[in-house]
Image: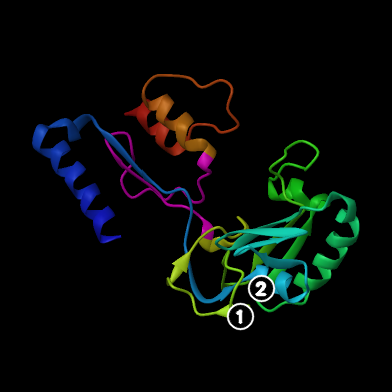
Amino acid sequence: MALLDHCVKRILEVLQRTGISQQATLFIVSDHGFREIKRELRPKVLLRQKGILHQESGDARGEAWVMSAGGAAMVYVTNPERKASLISQLRDLFAGAEGIDGTYGVEEFSKLGLPLPATSDQAPDLVLAAKPGYVFDNKSDGEYITEPAEGGTHGYLNTDPQMQAIFIAWGVDVPKGARLGTVSNLDVAPTVAALLGLTMTETKGKPIEQIVNHTIAH
């Protein structure tokens, strides 16, 4: 964070030194928030313990697979002939496991913003969500619960308030001291376009009124 802050400082110094700051607007944004973690979960260890996953020539192989991504993990059934029974078994397995906050099937993918397996060959069969303080890991050896190598991560469901991203606006087009409240990521690009005198017509987002209206008045 200190490095990122220093990079912003360098940009501001250049704007001020060259006089461009008198006609510049700067947005500082992030793509996600962050959460502290204290325990690491290895879902593949549970698969191994149930005989669903095994070691073969030094590699882990089996009828199901888990791809972990921070606070969420995608579960894939790799044996199509046993998909229905394995999904049911996996639901029960993960639903009762420590650190797992939710197990979501394809019927709930739409509210998670995920595609269905019928429309994407990358879509999982189940999605696991970690509880606060827990993170998923891809290793299949050792114990199910271990100590994490790092102190924080992201990748949790977007309903987690700590996953909200940063939006800071500064410059000639921004009213000083204004509080924007919650800003949608979808509104950032239309706002930039509006400040440049451009219009984005095929977007779900819209220009942020407090900034754009201030520019018109200014």
| Foreground residue among 214 and 110 | 110
- Residue located at (80% from left, 50% from top): 106
The quadrant in which residue 157 appears is bottom right
Q: On the rendered structure, is 182 left or right of 177?
A: right
Q: On the rendered structure, is 211 left or right of 98?
A: left
- Residue located at (59% from left, 74% from top): 141
Q: CA distance from mark 2 to mark 1?
A: 7 Å
Q: Secondary structure at mark 1?
A: loop
Looking at the image, which residue sits at the far front? 57
Question: Label 1 near label 2: C-beta < 8 Å?
Answer: yes
- Residue located at (46% from left, 37% from top): 188
| Foreground residue among 37 and 121 | 121
Give the answer, above or below, for where 29 lies relative to 155: above
Q: Which mark is residue 208?
A: none
Is residue 177 a member of the stretch shown in magenta? yes
**Image quadrant for the N terminus?**
bottom left
Q: Secondary structure at mark 2?
A: helix
Q: Which mark is residue 143?
A: 1
Q: Give the percent coordinates (x, y) of residue 100.
A: 68, 71
Magenta residues, dominant SS class: loop
The kind of residue tagged 2 is: Val
Q: Which residues are magenta?
A: 163-185
Please tell me how crowded label 2 is: few (under 14), some (14-19), or many (20+) other residues with Cα within 10 Å: many
**Image quadrant for the C terminus?**
top left
Q: Give the percent coordinates (x, y) of residue 59.
A: 61, 62
Is residue 57 a member of the stretch shown in magenta? no
The first of marks 2 and 1 along the sequence is 2
The kind of residue tagged 1 is: Glu
Q: Which residue is mark 2?
A: 45
Give the answer, above or below, for where 70 lies relative to 6: below
Q: Give the percent coordinates (x, y) of residue 101.
A: 69, 70
